[in-house]
Image (spheres, rainbow, N blue to C red):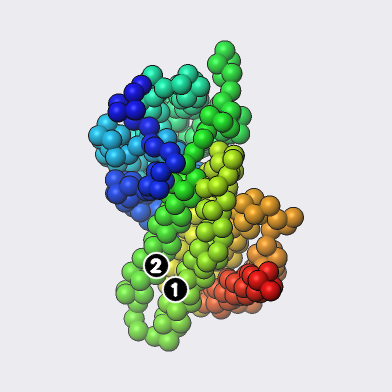
Amino acid sequence: MSRSRSLLRGRGSHDSGKVGMVELFFDLVFVFAVTQLSHSLLAHLSLGGALQVALLMVAVWWVWIFTSWITNWLDPETLPTRLGLFVLMVAGLLLSSSIPQAFGERGLLFAGAYVFMQVGRTAYALWAVRGEPVNMTRNFQRILLWLMFSGVFWITGGLLEGPQRLALWGLALAIEVLSPSLYFWVPGLGRSTLADWNVEGNHMAERCGLFVIIALGESLLVTGATFAELATSAQGLLGFVVAVLGSIAMWWVYFDSGAERAHHRIAHSDDPGRQARIAYTYLHLLIVAGIIVSAVADELVLMHPEHASPAGVLVIVGGPWLFLLGCALFKWVMNDRPLPPLSHLAGLAVLLLLLPAAWNQLFSALALGSLTTLVMMLVAAWETLALRERAATAGQ
């Protein structure tokens, strides 16, 4: 296909990795999706509810990150791709609106919207790369076949109820999550290679950073909305401050240095596809999940500062723990460290040490939330000071 007719994103120019306004507009749908996920988890604080929300959370992330891969390859400023994103926005709103009742009366709507987004977007990409090198066509053919295969289980699960729906949707999601690690191998078509996934590193890093901002923004929204409904009290004010400081600490841990160093690494890498797959496609799921669970914890602390149920304890400790685990692995993969950052490992250990005491009701919800926020702030300060000291030593 001639360059003038090609729908591919350009490569090598200063603006080739720039995130377009239409992509930011598309992301607004996922602000709503993240809010729906946190509210659903808060409404179903049980093992079964947590499993359901976890599955929906992975599904939301998966449909978003796959779309980000597509707009990394295809230019979202071209008219066909822009219109395609608008169609996906409509389907995304249907998907997001059905999240609270995805395991109830709106299961088929959720599954149908999800499959339409995954299969429809990939079918469009296959059409968009007609005339491009055959390896690119084969790549999208393989991806489309995998998504059509998993789509059978999504739709069938939407027609069933209860444990059968959960089992079939779990199988469908497992197929999709495993497929990139298997390079979308298909009998007769072989498998893709990392060379086929020659992503624009600047774009991928910025897209995932923006989704982290979306999740943090939802956390602040929950904090502000919940605090606005509370009667004025010292406990409420303290809970508000603790929640905001926790969000700031999470921003600091991710964005102060780690995100920028990883951004530089993938932008100048000879093998960006591998890093995009591991660090941004898989590991960022832990980071985003940690922020969403922490938003639920903030609301619990504000609403019930004096007592935390066993499920509440797991949420208050588990949110920061998931976030730190994701950040630790992300920085480890993207910096060739022999180990993840020591500050993060220490933070993970301290959070685990808090769990037995909190489980035995030695802390109120507010006290436990204050301690987890303190751990996050100490991790942020430790890493910042260590990096500043290392830079000063290297400059001597």
Residue position for label 2:
220
Residue 215 locus on image (x, y percent): 43, 58
Q: Quadrant of residue 356?
A: bottom right
Residue type marked 2: Leu
Residue most toward the right?
338
Label 2 element class: helix
Quarter of the image that includes the C terminus: bottom right
Quarter of the image that includes the N terminus: top left
Residue most toward the bottom?
234
In the depicted structure, whether residue 184 falls above or below residue 249: above
Number of other residues with Cα within 10 Å of mark 2, as a class: few under 14, some 14 to 19, many 20 or more: many
Observer-nearest of 184 and 236: 184
11 to the left or right of 259: left
Residue position for label 1:
244
Residue type marked 1: Val
Residue most toward the top?
188
In the depicted structure, whether residue 240 falls above or below residue 15: below
191 to the left or right of 393: left
Observer-nearest of 116 and 104: 116
Residue placed at 50% from the left, 45% from the top?
A: 201
Residue 67 in sight from this viewpoint: no
Q: Which mark is residue 321?
A: none
Upstream in the sequence, badge 1 or badge 2? 2
Per the model, the C-alpha gap separating discs 1 and 2 is 7 Å
Residue 198 locus on image (x, y percent): 51, 35
Residue placed at 27% from the left, 31% from the top?
A: 80
Label 1 element class: helix
Say if mark 1 contacts mark 2, CB within 8 Å: yes
Residue 116 locus on image (x, y percent): 36, 30
Residue placed at 43% from the left, 87% from the top?
A: 234
Observer-nearest of 392 and 168: 392
